[in-house]
Amino acid sequence: MHNNRRRGIILIVVSLVIVILLILLSVFIFKGVQEKDLIQRQKDTYEAFNLAEAGLDRAVTELKNDFNWAGITATALGRGEYSLTITSLSLTEREADCFGYIPSAASPSRTTHIKALIRKAIPANFYKNAVYSAGDVDFNGNSFSVANNEAPPDNKAVIYADEYDVQNPENITGTSTQDANISPLARLDFTQLRAMSVAQGNLYDAARLQDVQQGSDTFPAAFWSAQGTDGIDNDSDNFIDEADERVNIVYIEGDLQLNGNIGSIGGFFVVAGDVLTDPSGGADATINGNGSISGCIYTLGEFTVNGGGGNLNVDGGIWAQDEVGINGNASVTYNASYMNAISGLSINPDVQVVAWQEV
């Protein structure tokens, strides 16, 4: 009797354990399926976003060739498709609606929509400032100077988009203005500028930049090229442009590093990197730049100038995307003649995405 009761209890306990194990197994299987579905959904969402980005890249590429391009219907790429529609907002702005679909536009399990503002323009005040920073402005010490000596209201010394940190604002002659709309920095056509530079013999690649650092090569000594130093419009098109061969266009493939006594150099310096006159961390950090630059420096990176004992002067202007920093005994003075000559080159603006969001 007792044995039968014991066996019955054991059977009940074993049955309960089996039921519990089956429940736990079912939970684990259910969670595993859920996690697998979640991972797949995340993967599909990520790939749909990448497809929408591919559509945006396609939009930029096509609009560079034809700013009136209207978009495309669903196009296969990888595991899915993308499509995009271009809407004309003005002569210089387009809105791109870019969609990514997994697995297809006809029957999507995941869809991502990116809306972007694309611009092809140079702002009206682009050539009017001594310092033009689409990022921060950081001026240190009491020996620097920034000046635009034009008559008001043309005495625009500094325009910036983000933070403004100036220790001695009395060292600035002219107005300082914040305008968030100037970011990102207006993009000039680098392909056009490079071709113009090559035609003048002013292309500086890594090897030639190394020669400059070692003293076996030099940058142009003046803003104006050898021909046309009088600034006369030879072809009577009402502009001093590339046909007049007036401006030295110096194309820098990489960072521009100027150390020690740079002497007198000039031109329109187009930099595909950061502009530094006192590189951090190296042996050259103890040598501050001194000399003069006649013209304008344009970089999609940052511009940092550190004047030495003999001063470092920029006569013309500075355009930078990330930051303009001036330290020590350095000065930047606006030169309307140089800026007007660069404006007269009729350099094409390039297409760029100025804002985007995932809808």
Image (cartoon, rainbow, N blue to C red):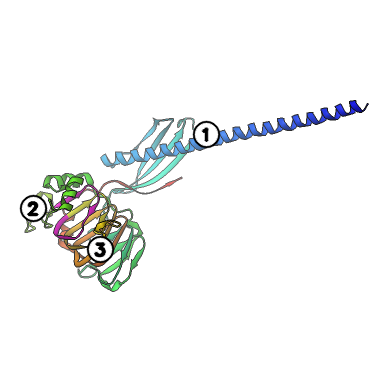
> Is residue 263 shown in magenta?
yes
Is disc 2 placed on a helix, strand or loop? loop
Viewer-closest of 205 and 335: 205
For residue 257, side relative to residue 26 (left or right): left
> Can the viewer see residue 345?
no
Figure quadrant of residue 327: bottom left
> Is residue 272 shown in magenta?
no
Q: CA distance from mark 1 to mark 2?
A: 65 Å
**Residue bearing mark 1:** 40
Q: Which residues are magenta?
A: 247-267
**Residue bearing mark 2:** 236
Is disc 1 placed on a helix, strand or loop? helix
Figure quadrant of residue 195: top left
* 1 vs 2, front mark: 1
Disc 3 + disc 1, Cβ < 8 Å: no
Which secondary structure type mostly characterizes the magenta part of the structure? strand
Is disc 3 placed on a helix, strand or loop? strand
